[in-house]
Image: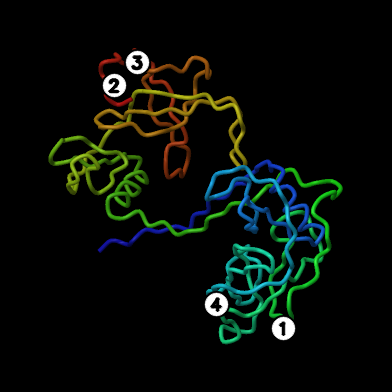
Amino acid sequence: MSEVLKAPLVVEFPFTRSLGPVQSAFLTGLREQVVLGVRTSDGRTLVPPVEYDPVTADELHDLAEVAPTGTVTTWAWNHAPRRGQPLTTPFAWVLVRLDGADTALLHVLDAPGPDAVRTGMRVRIRWAPERTGAVTDIACFEPYDGGPAPLTGRTDGHADPVTGIVAAARLDYTYSPGRAQSAYIAGLSDRRTLGERCPSCRKVYVPPRGACPTCGVPTAEQVEVGPGGTVTTFCIVNIKAKNLDIEVPYVYAHIALDGAGLALHGRIGGIPYDQVRMGLRVEPVWTQDARYPDHYRPTGEPDAEYDTYKELL
């Protein structure tokens, strides 16, 4: 049996969003150690606040302060915290209904172990020593034996309100390509592009998927395609990507390799970006020790007729 391929992968990007008046007030309040909810027309107080009533869809704007103390409504123990989570030691994920609120806030509880956590226990906010106007201004919750804490009486008027946030989104995972794509990757190491043919519709899929997505039957017959191909569609990239050493503008295209039943994507080089066109005939360019083509360049052949690739758009 051949070795099962796997590789660690990371998808990471900053997510930037602006805030409306309700969310702005909530995060600005956290920075000032004040917890604000929003009151609905029927008297409920929602924490975290939302800008529209989830029941009536009415616009909400009546802010109300709630206490930094509350009650755990449900919880789950996290015995192995991951990178970027609020605490580095084991903790409980908790839903806390703060005193004065009618909904629960999701956060973490600093507790010595799962035996110290229970539904109905009283907790209070532990504020972060440095606060910037984010939900992480609540460092965590901690056990608490008292009743509702006093309110500050502040619902507005904070200087320098928070108007936007940038949240770092990150996903770490291990990818295993399976039999069909493992063969495809192994073929690339020999500078060959391998697809698999569906026994029913006879379409050749590149990269192969192990089954035909149209007919739903397994594919096993390997077919070498290319190396040449035809540009079917393309776009001009004008924004430079982080950690990508390619000068803009450049062209990214869908390329139908000869013999393939669908197009794959690749960068077009060796030609001014404004001369790339549908039907352009291209071939792969490999760099030394590369595991996949660096880019595709024109072959010098006449452009392909539209009818030869229109089904691959």
Residue type beneath disc 3: Glu
Residue type beneath disc 4: His
Q: Residue at image x 13%, y 41%?
A: 199
Q: Secondary structure at mark 1?
A: loop
Camera-nearest label, 4 or 1: 1
First-in-chain label (3 vs 1): 1
The N terminus: image quadrant? bottom left
First-in-chain label (1 vs 2): 1
Q: Secondary structure at mark 4?
A: loop
Give the class, few, some or many, for how many residues have Cα within 10 Å of label 3's Cα (few <14, many ≥20).
few
Tell me where residue 155 appears, x and y as whole percent: 79, 54
Residue type beneath disc 1: Asp
Residue, disc 3: 301
Q: CA distance from mark 1 to mark 2?
A: 72 Å
* Picture layout, residue 116 above or below residue 55: below
Give the class, few, some or many, for how many residues have Cα within 10 Å of label 2's Cα (few <14, many ≥20).
some
Residue, disc 2: 309
Residue, disc 4: 79
Q: As drawn, is 224 to the left or to the right of 239?
A: left
